[in-house]
Structure formats: C-alpha cells, structure tokens
Amino acid sequence: MGSMLERPMRAAILGAADSPLVRRAVTRYGMRLGARRFVAGETAAEFMTAARVANGQGFAVAATILGESVRDSDETRAVTAEYCRLLRAFADEGLDANVAFKLTHVGLDIDEDLAFENASQIAKAAHESGRTVRMDMEQSRYVDRTLAIYRRLRVGHRNVGVALQSYLYRSRADLAGMLELEPNVRIVKGAYLEPSDVAYPRKADVDAAYVGLAQLALAHDGYTAIATHDAAIIDRVAEFADARSLPRRGRFEFQMLYGIATALARSVLRRGYRVRLSIPFGEYWFPYLMRRLAERPANVAFFLRGALTR
C-alpha cells in the first residue's frame, strides 16, 4: 500500500516469502537476527513470559499461534487443543489475555464444517475461561466463509469477534450487514497483496476507509478493536469517541503488534485507553515476519541492521 515504490517492495518481499531458499535462510538465522522483536518465540512458555511482562506494563495481550493453510485435519485439532490450553492457562494465572486465530489454521482449507467445529471448541474454552476470542481475516477469497462462520458462532457465543480489513472495498458493507449482531469487530488495514479490483491501491484511500469503518462501528452497539500504529488515526478515533461520550474503557480498545510502535502504544496507554498487544509465537513465524517486513520499510531496515551487526 502507499507510494509507487512501496507496492513493488511489498510484492518483492511477499514473493520472497514463497522462496524455499529464503525460507531456509531466514528460518535458520532469523530469530537470532531480529525476528524476536516481532515474535515472542517458538513455544507457549516463551509467549507466557512475554505476556506477563506486557501485563506488568499495563497492556492486555492477544495470543496468536502462528500458522495458516493447514491441510491435515489432525494438525488442526492439535492447534485447537493448544488454543484451549492457552485459554485455561490465562484463567489459572489471571492474565489479561485472549486469543486470535486464523480459520485456515483450524481447517478452513479442508472443510468449512471442520473449521467451524474447531472454532466452536476454542470459543467454548474462551467462554469457560472468561475470555474473548477473535478470528483473523485472511486473503479476500476467505472473507465470505469467515463471515459465515462468524455469524454461526455468534448465535451461541457472544464472546467471539472477527476482523475486517479497510483496504477491501467490501468491508463497509460487511460491517453494516453485521451491526444487528452487536459485533465484536477488530479493524485492520490489511496485510496481504490484493488486486486493485478488490482493494484500494492508495494508502490515503485505505486510511479513509479505516476511519469510516471505525466510526461506523463505534456509532453502534458492540465492541470495537482499533488495530493500528497510525497516530493520526488513533487521534481521529479518540476524538470521535469523546464526541459521543464513549468511555475510554469498555466499548473499544486500541491494538498494536508486539515489537512495533512501542512508544506510541505506551503513550496511548498513558492517556487512559485500553491497549492490547498482539503477541504471536510458534514455529511457523516466517510468513508472519515477511508480512511485517512488507508493511513498513523501517521494519526491513531494522531486520537488516540485525543481520549486519552479528
């Protein structure tokens, strides 16, 4: 997204993510070279350590086990069980934490009913643990199936949320169509490379659509997660919420990614808002890292500095 130079750069980085050679090199050395800035580690124990630190600083957290496009049903059930264990661990330890997961990680590429079954188990474990759970939004080809599963889950699980991507033309209509559900919705800009017939190619349009989605969500009942590192958007959302006399905690929260815009996250927290850090972990961190590098040239510079100074 953004300038004429940024889109080819994003395409190149995301293309490199499909290269077996790049994957082997980065997977072997990347965690030591700087990937740990964006990923808590490869194990649940490493995540729990990062979550405790974040809670101690005043942040809520969201756990994501990295992985997607799983095509083995037994693996999807193992992932589901791991999310359920995490949720029970949050309750046992009293951590301010929830989980977010991709439906393709729990079976959507295999069978929609399998993904629904696994997502239902995670939602049930979250309910029993007094936590919420959100489904991430993936490439545009998954939007219809993701929203269909969200609607099915929302009937019996009020603690379930879903993400919408502002760079997709369709997202405003998607949000309007679910307002009757008083949705728990997470608004993001979008991290995949989508064609211009389905997504805004210009950053200014993505940003404008983002603010529009946030205002539409906040103007209706439900809960809204404003997931952005854009200080200008944060200020506009805060002004809109203040104008409607919305409490700074209880109706919405700001969310940021682990290791990105840390100073901004702390400043928003100091203003009295609820801020949740999305903290990923797991062995399959390579695609996640590549998307983070593709989003901002500054992230690429950070990673290369780490590689060149070791």
Image (spheres, rainbow, N blue to C red):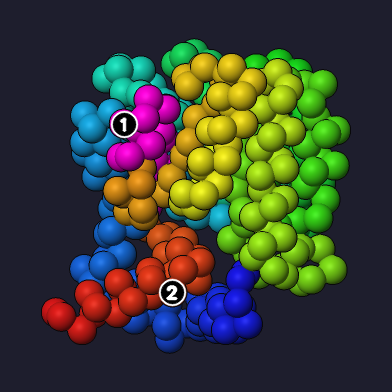
Q: Secondary structure at mark 2?
A: helix
**Residue 206 screen position, x and y as percent:** 68, 58
Closer to the camera: disc 2 or disc 1? 1
**First of labels 2, 1 by sequence position:** 1
Taking 126 as reference, is 92 left or right? Answer: left
Which residue is pictured at 57% across the width and 41% down the height? 236
Taking 88 as reference, is 218 left or right? Answer: right
**Residue 161 screen position, x and y as percent:** 63, 30
Which residue is pictured at 83% across the width and 34% down the height? 176
Pick whichever, 261 or 130, lies toward us.
261
Which residue is pictured at 66% across the width and 37% down the height? 214
Taking 55 as reference, is 145 left or right? Answer: right
Which amino acid type is marked by label 1? Arg
Which residue is pictured at 42% across the width and 49% down the height? 257
Find out whether the residues at labels 2 and 1 contact each other: C-beta distance under 8 Å: no
Which segment did they paint magenta? Answer: 266-282
In which quadrant of the rendered view does residue 191 lie?
bottom right
Q: Secondary structure at mark 1?
A: helix
Binning the other alpha carbons within 10 Å of mark 1 as few (below 14), some (14 to 19) or many (20 upward) gives few
Q: Which residue is mark 2?
A: 297
Which amino acid type is marked by label 2? Pro
Q: Which residue is mark 1?
A: 270
Figure check: 194 above or below 137: below
**Residue 5 screen position, x and y as percent:** 57, 84
Q: Dividing the image into 4 quarters, which one contains the N terminus?
A: bottom right
Pick whichever, 245 or 1, lies toward us.
245
Magenta stretch containing residue 75, yes or no? no
